[in-house]
Amino acid sequence: MASAADRVKSPARTSVWLEQRPPSRTRRADQPAGLDREKITAATVRLLDAEGLAKFSMRRLAAELDVTAMSLYWYVDTKDDLLELALDSVYREITPPREEDAHWHDRLRELATTYRELLVRHVWVSPLAGHFLNIGPHSMLFSYAVQDVIRATGLPLRRQTGALSAVFQFVYGFGTIEGHFVQRSAEAGLSQDEFFQQAMGTIRSQPQFSRMVESSQDLMDARGGDTVEEMRERDFDFALDLLIAGIEAMRDR
Amino acid sequence: MASAADRVKSPARTSVWLEQRPPSRTRRADQPAGLDREKITAATVRLLDAEGLAKFSMRRLAAELDVTAMSLYWYVDTKDDLLELALDSVYREITPPREEDAHWHDRLRELATTYRELLVRHVWVSPLAGHFLNIGPHSMLFSYAVQDVIRATGLPLRRQTGALSAVFQFVYGFGTIEGHFVQRSAEAGLSQDEFFQQAMGTIRSQPQFSRMVESSQDLMDARGGDTVEEMRERDFDFALDLLIAGIEAMRDR
DNA sequence: ACCTGAACACCGTTCAAGT
DNA sequence: ACCTGAACACCGTTCAAGT
């Protein structure tokens, strides 16, 4: 039994960036609402930052642009296309450090930090980056910057994809969790420390969890740092040191 | 101006696992539809595996259980609660390796591999694990297994959270991307290799990408392995070796 | 105690029609 | 070329009502 979902336009599109249509859908002076892809994309990013991925809708975006939802479909085929455009556009914020003479340790640390900050600043990037192909021009530039740094490690070529994966999948995971925590704190109207204390308190008050919390108390105590942010900073720095040390060790093996 | 979203039940719930109500909502013989939380959770996992997170809805699940959507709300407060229950339940599949005498290298590799497989088998776990607190009983057991392994590394206590983060955030990111690729291939009705070839072909055919693809051709060529799966396997193994070497190096520093 | 039907306030998207 | 209104087939959730 064929459902509507089975009747797919030929061929199934996997990304906005692979569409054939000329990218000439740009603003013209006589356009009624003065829309174009850039304007729509910018508004999408603004809305996603302000209200989150869950609340974002074509109708909500249209209202923001003083237009009906349907007019957006003149510039974009689907909501997913729009999200892909928004996703790629924020990678512009990562300006690859072009000081090629710096030690790769520092270049790697800088790139990892910038990426982490991007994921925290735009929490919606993490789910979307996991979901789309992410081959837009700006994310491509980022991924080539990553490749450049890995090349500079001196690892044999056949090891480089694995090392790249170790470092940047870590940063992706770290930034995802961090961004989520920041967002939850803000939603609760609390500082990160207040939110952390409250969450721990609630968990500890549940008898079924007390045993588990105790067993990891030593880890928490030894983590060091007075605030949640400080602890996280130490963890991130140490993890990067660990990864760098790992790369050195594998290179000399 | 107060919107409906501002009027929040006191206090804002952050997890099913923190609800106060007695967990006594269990099956009784005389129940019309014979439902209970376990049955509903199991059906949720089945549906999520079969049709994905995007297509999952309360109405769809209800149909699967031969019941109206509203009857589900007797057992669960919101759709999110249900997703949290489903999420935690699959962590049951990770049975922590209880051979405490094995070398921590092997225990870490085994735990990482099991976690990776979980993320690939249930692609919907990755977005949910990023979104919820993930403090259910089964995920707790997993996270304590992780702590045990990290403890066995011999790293000083204050370094352990950072090392834990490096290893398991990497696995999370790796499994997320892998699961997504597997899913996309399956949706397109292609093997992973066919899908990969097709995607590369499409990208290469776009003039705006050819320059970029070329620049990373050497990396791809050197990656080794004849199939996508083989290349991925090598990358994963190497990344784990790198992380283990990094831990050793930091311990002796 | 458990389940249902009707209703509310939303979605993404299509299509024919307007300017 | 660009934008709209009406309509379709969906959502999650509430609430009063049934058994």
Image: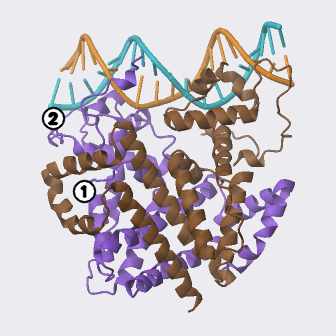
Chain colours: A purple, B brown, C orange, D cyan
**Percent from the top left, x then y, of residue B11?**
76, 46
Image coords of residue A196 (percent x, y): 70, 63
Describe the element under mark 1 as helix, strand or loop. Answer: helix
The residue wearing badge 1 is A137
Please give the label number shown on residue B198. none
Determine the residue positioned at 34% across, 32% down: A67
Q: CA distance from mark 2 to mark 1?
A: 29 Å
Using the image, name the chain to which the residue with label 1 belongs.
A
Q: Is residue A29 left or right of residue B74?
A: left
Give the residue type at disc 2: Asp
Kind of residue at badge 1: Pro
Q: Position of residue B58 (x, y in %)?
A: 61, 28
Chain identity of mark 2: A
User: Can you say whether A139 is above or below B195 in the image?
Assistant: below
Q: Count neighbours of disc 2 (C-alpha within 10 A) and say few if under 14, some if 14 to 19, many if 20 or more.
A: few
Quarter occupied by the N terminus of chain B = top right
Residue A174 visible at all: no
Of A161 and B60, nearer the camera is A161
Image quadrant assignment for residue A251? bottom left
- Please name the residue that numbered disc 2 is placed on: A30
Look at the numbered disc 2 and give the secondary structure of its residue.
loop
Chain-order first, disc 2 or disc 1: 2
Q: Quadrant of residue A90?
A: bottom left
